[in-house]
């Protein structure tokens, strides 16, 4: 691990405490951050290049939704890129089975290496288009962090969900238009404001389910 990444431990531990997550998560999360920073220098996996910025905008931003996943057993992270939010969530929630869905070859190679290096038995990689994924069992939830509009996410990945399954979409401040254009058979169950340590911008988790599902 580089000195730049290792020096971020106090900042990460402070962020974990603010999110009510265990400080012991810092070590594997920093291992992931170091691997991402190293691969990013060659393969350009993310536009954010500084490890400290990655810490806030990638790790802590991803982990802000962890409290809402404690009752979820299986999750598909659609268009995960270099594993966001899926890998930090798999680290933080070992009982959560995460499928990382990514069509870009170099990003999928990184994901497989990260899962291997980090020893994550609860994470699997699917290299291919979202609509091509045909799981043996449908998922409790799907998530997407910076993939597409809500209607498009459901168009691409709605088939992956159990009848009672939910889309847990991470959005910034401007999502009202997307909500207004949701298909008639989907509805918003809840909108959760997220507090991401060190991040000033607004973040929200939108909990979306089929319209017939009880609240």
Image (spheres, helix red, strand yellow):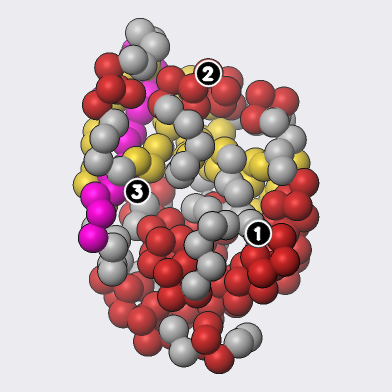
Distance between the alpha carbons at the discs numbered 3 and 2: 23 Å
Distance between the alpha carbons at the discs numbered 3 and 1: 31 Å
* Residue 208 is inside the magenta segment: yes
Quadrant location of residue 118?
A: bottom right
In the image, residue 23 sits, relative to residue 43, either above or below, namely below
Viewer-nearest residue: 148 or 194: 148
Quadrant location of residue 44?
A: bottom right
Mark 2 lies on residue = 155
Crowding at dot 2, Cα within 10 Å, few <14 / some 14-19 / many 20+, comes out as: few
Residue 41 visible in rendering? yes
Query: Which quadrant does the N terminus fall into?
Result: bottom right
Residues shaded magenta? 200-215
Crowding at dot 3, Cα within 10 Å, few <14 / some 14-19 / many 20+, comes out as: few
The secondary structure type at the circle numbered 3 is helix
Disc 3 vs disc 2: Cβ atoms closer than 8 Å? no
Crowding at dot 1, Cα within 10 Å, few <14 / some 14-19 / many 20+, comes out as: some
Viewer-nearest residue: 205 or 6: 6
- Image position, residue 165 (x, y; %): 46, 28
Number of numbered discs on residues: 3
Mark 3 lies on residue = 68
Q: Mark 3 or mark 2: name the one nearer the start of the chain.
A: 3
- Image position, residue 192 (x, y; %): 24, 43
Query: Which quadrant does the C terminus fall into?
Result: top left
Viewer-nearest residue: 27 or 81: 81
Disc 1 vs disc 2: Cβ atoms closer than 8 Å? no
Mark 1 lies on residue = 44
- Image position, residue 145 (x, y; %): 45, 44
Q: Give residue 146's mark.
A: none
């Amino acid at each position: 691990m580089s000195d730049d990444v290792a020096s971020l431990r106090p900042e990460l531990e402070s962020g974990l405490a603010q999110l009510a997550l265990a400080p012991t998560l810092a070590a594997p999360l920093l291992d992931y951050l170091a691997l991402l920073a190293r691969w990013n220098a060659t393969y350009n996996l993310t536009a954010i290049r500084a490890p400290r910025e990655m810490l806030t905008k990638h790790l802590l931003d991803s982990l802000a939704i962890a409290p809402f996943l404690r009752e979820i057993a299986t999750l598909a992270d659609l268009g995960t890129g270099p594993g966001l939010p899926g890998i930090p969530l798999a680290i933080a929630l070992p009982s959560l089975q995460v499928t990382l869905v990514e069509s870009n070859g170099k990003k999928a190679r990184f994901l497989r290496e990260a899962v291997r290096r980090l020893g994550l038995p609860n994470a699997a990689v699917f290299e291919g288009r979202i609509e091509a994924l045909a799981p043996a069992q449908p998922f409790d939830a799907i998530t997407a962090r910076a993939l597409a509009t809500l209607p498009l996410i459901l168009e691409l990945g709605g088939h992956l969900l159990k009848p009672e399954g939910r889309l847990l979409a991470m959005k910034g401040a401007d999502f009202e238009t997307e909500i207004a254009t949701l298909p008639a058979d989907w509805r918003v169950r809840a909108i959760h404001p997220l507090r991401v340590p060190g991040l000033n911008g607004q973040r929200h988790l939108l909990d979306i389910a089929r319209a017939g599902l009880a609240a």
